[in-house]
Amino acid sequence: MSSRRSSRGNISEDEINELISKLQALLPSSRRRGSGQASTTKLLKETCSYIKSLHREVDDLSDRLSDLMSTMDHNSPGAEIIRSILRS
Amino acid sequence: MARCQGTVESLCQGLLDLDDDKFGAMCSAFGYLQEWPDLSAMCGAGLGATGVAAPGAGDGNDSSSCSGSGGADAGGFRKRRPDAYLDAKVDGNDMSKRPRGKQQLQQLCGVGEIAAPGKGKQERPKPGAKKKAEAASTAAAAGQKTDYIHVRARRGQATDSHSLAERVRRERISERMRYLQELVPGCSKVTGKAGMLDEIINYVQSLQKQVEFLSMKIAASNPVVSFDIVEDLFGRQLKQACGPAALPAAIALPAGQLEPSCLQMSPMQQVHPSAAAGSTGFGLDMVVNNMYPPAAATCPVSAATPVNGAAAAWDIVSQNLFSGFDAQFQSVESE
């Protein structure tokens, strides 16, 4: 029944399912929960919140990084950061 | 609905003179029937999960209680409990009730078939009646075979309610997809679910990489950070930067400063031209230019010096790592 439905577009259901599971593997919560197939609705909801949390994290880290950079600028501009990166 | 309740009530009245205990059971069953509109309204309003999950249970219940009478309709989940009451009752006084049940059944069928959209509410009292009729018919056999037709009709409707829940589910999915489309840049241009999912996956991956990269960068530029943390971060970064998975990060970002091919370039190729030609390459000077506009002139030199000096000691790992780092960093910068 469901195959009939999703074959309306010319994307196969397998393809969608593959993408869905691929997406699920990216989400931290579903990765933790194991292989249990959550509903698509739930998965998409989780994706939304995960993307939002990633945005937040990126913003936060960018702020921290630019703070860090600006403080370093005065001490030893540029080279200090680069050296610390290269050292590792 | 009013009509259906009326029939159930009349049934209750019929039972009244039969047995007090059974009447009590019937009344409680009727109480369930009255409660159900809420339930069905909830189902209709968008509890797709319950709607989807319940029919399976309902089917099992039906087939067991009907014992091969062909009444495994998906609407069964709504009437499970009352069935128990009704069945118990029916066993005792089936003969007096049977004609009534049958009549009622036909009536209800007429109502239900006409009003498909509002069917959720009309269905509910009906199943109880039908159940009774079925139980009666299994007890009395032959003459009631026509009921099965009604059961079938109802089964068709039940499938409809099933598909109603399915429709609700699909609606919610597409609503989520629309929401995700807003969240993911470039996703609105893509048509089709597969393309959108692809885009979402790429975007999530690129975000994950950005987060990892930024935390690595912070760890790397923070002098007090312990060595193994940095190494761990770099190691993870390396895996991503070297694999083809690193490409989405570059593609997803709008500025397009970074050609995917640079990921494959060796760090020496990047650093030497940039050190020689000033700010033309993608090398460290670019990074530094973005971060420190005033210091742009001096930085390439200071960056290149340690690179050249240490180059001999570097193994291939750190070289790849470096190029990956550059690429990632520019991705982040360009956003």
Image (cartoon, rainbow, N blue to C red):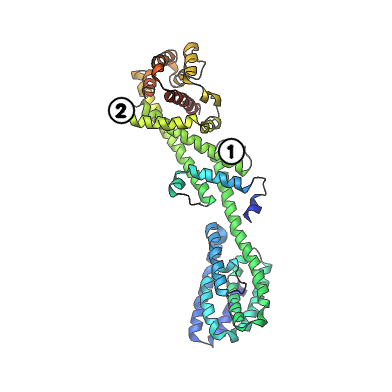
Is residue A32 rendered to the left or right of residue B254? left
In the rendered image, residues at marks 1 and 2 fall on the same chain: yes
Question: From this viewpoint, is residue A75 visible?
Answer: yes
Q: Which residue occupies the foreground of this view, B25 or B141?
A: B141
Compared with B293, B9 (above or below) is: below
Residue farthest toward the bottom in the current orientation of the protein:
B17
Q: Nearer the viewer, mark 1 or mark 2?
A: 2
Q: Amino acid at mark 1?
A: Cys
| Residue B187: mark in rendering | 1
Res B308 quadrant in image: top left
Q: Nearer the viewer, residue A1 or B80?
A: A1
Q: Quadrant of residue B255?
A: top right
Instruction: Mark yes or no: residue B259 visible.
Output: no
Q: Position of residue A56 (x, y in %)?
A: 44, 37
Instruction: Identify the secondary structure beneath mark 1.
Output: loop
Q: Which residue is mark 2?
A: B224
Three-letter amino acid code at the position of disc 2:
Val
**Residue depicted at x 35% and y 18%:** A76
At a point 38% along the width and 32% down the height, the residue shown is: B232
Chain label for disc 1? B
